[in-house]
């Protein structure tokens, strides 16, 4: 059985519109596979208040209770290690006592994203379900391994409500890029998001592995992507080069320090203000990339201020810097963004900026 078969367009489809509208869930999968390395995606999610250990039975009960309050009707227990989970029976009884249906998927359950198959997936499960790993990370689905949050540091309802990725995935007709968007099946199939992400780094790209896309001409946008055209700054004020990775309300970019760029001191070192500008431009790249499909332009925005800037090192001409940014909080068009600038995994600067950007319907 593939992940697309589990929650295909048949089961729970009658209630899907209701789920989309209410930002609710109809089904929840709890996956018991080993802890995975999600890379930079968890840097801003892990607040240090929990360690990388499995959720306790009590924590799992809490998650199931929270999911019931969100509208979940069925809990699926999955993963190669599900049968070795010592309290599995008790967990199933707990769910059933809450009038939830349960299902058990063992090692015969395969993820379509890594199966090598090129069938149309006919999968729309992001509209009404998500996964929680036994380590507490919430993921959109088995093949789209981007943590949206962790239930140890946030309520499940808040993770779902705040997730830009889920919000995008629930609106495929407006958000998917390329040929899948114009496919006659878009109402019942939005491409395998896992396959699209693995191939392009963009969870909203078309599923180019689908056999229906083999004969279609298309321009594929893949990450890393030069930021020209997706951020408002033009040379020489554009001081970052590429948008490299997307994650939940976060992104990583890179910048090569050049002699002729602004904010360079006489000795070739980078002025501290450049780090703030890199953080601001990186968040503009994230917003511009999300917005690409709709207007082709990056949303208008301004840097309003900065705080908690900590300088831990210096960069000079020729250095390749990595900039990681995270939308920490938002109030209407105003937002607080956390950023980290590093070189070869050594943090040079971290801080927060306050930004304003024009909000559109996708926000
Ligand atoms: S989008 Fe792909 S990986 Fe995700 S559940 Fe559907 S078929 Fe599986
Ligand atoms: S082209 Fe895209 S939307 Fe159409 S069937 Fe294939 S994966 Fe689904």
Image: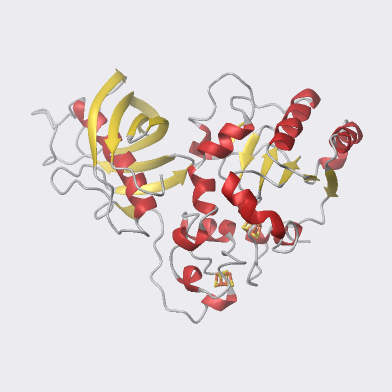
Residue 58 in the image: x percent, y percent?
79, 23
The image quadrant of residue 281 is: top left
Residue under the point 70% across and 26% down? 53
Q: Is residue 334 left or right of residue 363?
A: left
Q: Is residue 164 left or right of residue 34?
A: left
Pick whichever, 151 or 146, lies toward us: 151
Pick whichever, 229 or 198, lies toward us: 229
Name of the residue lying farthest toward the left: 266
Residue 217 in the image: x percent, y percent?
42, 78
In this rendering, the answer to whether 333 lies above or below 130 is above
How many badges with numbers are in the image?
A: 0
Pick whichever, 359 or 58, lies toward us: 359
The image quadrant of residue 96 is: top right
In this rendering, the answer to whether 66 lies above or below 106 is above
Residue under the point 39% across and 49% down? 361
Q: Quadrant of ligand 2?
A: bottom right
Residue under the point 35% across and 43% down? 253
Residue 276 in the image: x percent, y percent?
25, 29
Quarter of the figure with the N terminus: bottom right
Pick whichever, 350 or 229, lies toward us: 229
Residue under the point 85% across and 39% down? 99
């Amino acid at each position: 059985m593939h992940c697309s078969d589990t929650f295909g367009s048949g089961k729970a489809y009658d209630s899907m519109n209701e789920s989309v509208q209410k930002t609710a869930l109809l089904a929840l999968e709890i996956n018991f596979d080993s802890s995975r390395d999600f890379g930079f995606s968890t840097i801003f999610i892990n607040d240090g208040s929990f360690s990388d250990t499995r959720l306790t039975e009590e924590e799992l009960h809490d998650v199931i209770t929270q999911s019931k309050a969100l509208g979940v009707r069925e809990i699926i227990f999955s993963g190669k290690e599900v049968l070795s989970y010592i309290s599995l029976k008790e967990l199933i009884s707990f769910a059933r006592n809450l009038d939830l249906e349960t299902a058990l998927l063992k090692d015969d359950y395969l993820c379509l994203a890594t199966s090598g198959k090129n069938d149309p997936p006919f999968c729309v499960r992001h509209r009404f379900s998500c996964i929680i790993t036994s380590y507490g990370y919430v993921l959109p689905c088995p093949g789209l391994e981007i943590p949206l949050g962790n239930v140890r540091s946030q309520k499940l309802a808040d993770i779902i409500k705040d997730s830009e990725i889920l919000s995008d995935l629930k609106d495929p007709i407006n958000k998917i890029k390329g040929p899948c968007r114009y496919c006659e099946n878009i109402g019942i199939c939005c491409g395998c998001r896992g396959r699209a992400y693995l191939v392009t780094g963009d969870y909203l790209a078309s599923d180019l592995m689908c056999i229906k896309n083999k004969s279609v001409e298309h321009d594929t946008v893949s990450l890393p992507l030069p930021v020209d055209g997706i951020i408002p700054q033009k040379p020489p004020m554009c001081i970052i080069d590429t948008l490299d990775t997307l994650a939940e309300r976060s992104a990583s970019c890179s910048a090569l320090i050049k002699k002729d760029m602004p904010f360079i001191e006489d000795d070739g070192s980078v002025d501290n203000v450049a780090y703030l500008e890199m953080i601001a431009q990186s968040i503009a790249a994230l917003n511009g990339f999300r917005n690409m499909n709709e207007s082709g332009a990056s949303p208008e925005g301004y840097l309003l201020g900065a705080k908690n800037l900590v300088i831990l090192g210096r960069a000079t001409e020729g250095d390749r810097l990595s900039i990681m940014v995270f939308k920490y909080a938002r109030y209407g068009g105003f937002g607080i963004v956390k950023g980290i600038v590093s070189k070869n995994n050594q943090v040079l600067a971290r801080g927060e900026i306050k930004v304003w950007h024009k909000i559109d319907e996708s926000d």
